Amino acid sequence: MILRHIRLFIAVGVVWFIVYSFRQSHPSTLRTTQPQDVCAAHRWKPFKQSPSTPPRKVYTLLMVNTELDMLEVHLNTTYHAVDHFVLVEGAQTFTGHPKPLHLKPSLSSLSSYAPKIIYHEITYPLSFRPKTPWNIEDFQRNALLTQALTGPSTPNPNDVLIVADIDEIPRPSTISLLRACAFPRRTTLFSKFYYYSFQHRHVGPEWPHPQATTYHGRATILPNDLRTNTGFFLTAWLQRGGIANAAWHCSSCFGTIEEFLTKMRSFSHVWMNGEVYRDRRRIVERVGQGKDLWDREGEVFEKVEGNEDVPGFLREGEEGRRRFGYMVERDEKGAGFKDWEGE
């Protein structure tokens, strides 16, 4: 009996490996132009648009904290590929402490992107009694669907939903691919992984986010379940797909030290907000040198000089580099932080 269970476990593992490997596409195929060709290259079929339904739309779902610079880079880079940006923010951190709304009073500065923005302030029902920081984070992420995409903002069946963090920016070609194809319901957009700026690339595998799915009313996969691949294990495995080199991820690419400190206060991992890590000089030194602020084992970054594989807003024209030069490189005094006044 034990041997039979072992064989079954091995068989399921082999099936998952074959299916997942089969569905994880190579990035070079993103260069094809015809829908039937680009979808076939990923072993997918083209999406069949019904004549009686509106054209398929793409929604990018984003939780907002303080990262307004990165938000603008995200919006600008993907604006022409996306139909709607769903932006939500809440008045409390993941640890349950009150916090100000940063995006709401700043929406006027994003007026050029307003036609595609769906903004929502998260509401917390009286029955909500979180026991851990993860409960709050899960609730806020799910609000992207359960609160923001209701009523007039409700998507149509089979519309594309991309669940991302602000610092996870899909390549426009990836978004076009998702719009054109019938892709798996749990598709991972693997990201080139950077820290502090696009000058410091993380050594190791690509970042396994963001995720994409399709809208199916109440049967839509909740954003948090999609991101964490939660669900019946065999169904979740069989629904998985992936695209390599499909996005950029720049973690902790902040323009101010204060943003760093704010992020630490909101961490679900409370230990990462320790006093030793909040020292401003330490933050400047670690960011400038491309070293992990928390001394985590295996978190190693390599310096990439003159990196041209960056989001379009930082590569095309002068405005992006002029305003957000710290995202491109950290060689300046004070690691490019706008609020550093030390020697």
Image (spheres, rainbow, N blue to C red):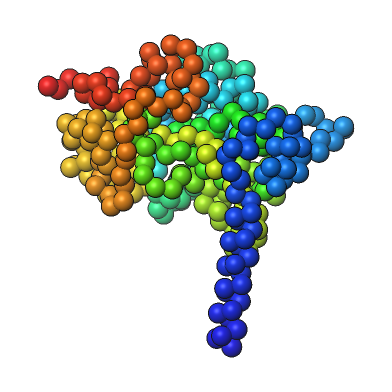
| Image side of residue 58 versus residue 321, left or right | right
Q: Residue at x 56, y 51 (%)?
A: 225
Residue 295: percent from left, percent from top: 24, 47
In the displayed structure, 304 sits above or below 26; it is above
Location of residue 106 by image quarter? top left
As drawn, the residue found furthest toward the right would be 52
| Image side of residue 297 versus residue 175, left or right | left
Q: Residue at x 69, y 42 (%)?
A: 41
Location of residue 249 by image quarter? top left
Residue 204: percent from left, percent from top: 39, 47
Residue 309: percent from left, percent from top: 46, 28
The one nearer the camera, 154 or 283, is 283
Residue 56: percent from left, percent from top: 74, 32
Residue 39 shows in this picture: yes
Q: Residue at x 50, y 22 (%)?
A: 312
Q: Residue at x 17, y 20 (%)?
A: 341
The one nearer the camera, 154 or 282, is 282
As drawn, the residue found furthest toward the top would be 318
Quarter of the image with the C terminus in it = top left
| Image side of residue 331 versus residue 237, left or right | left
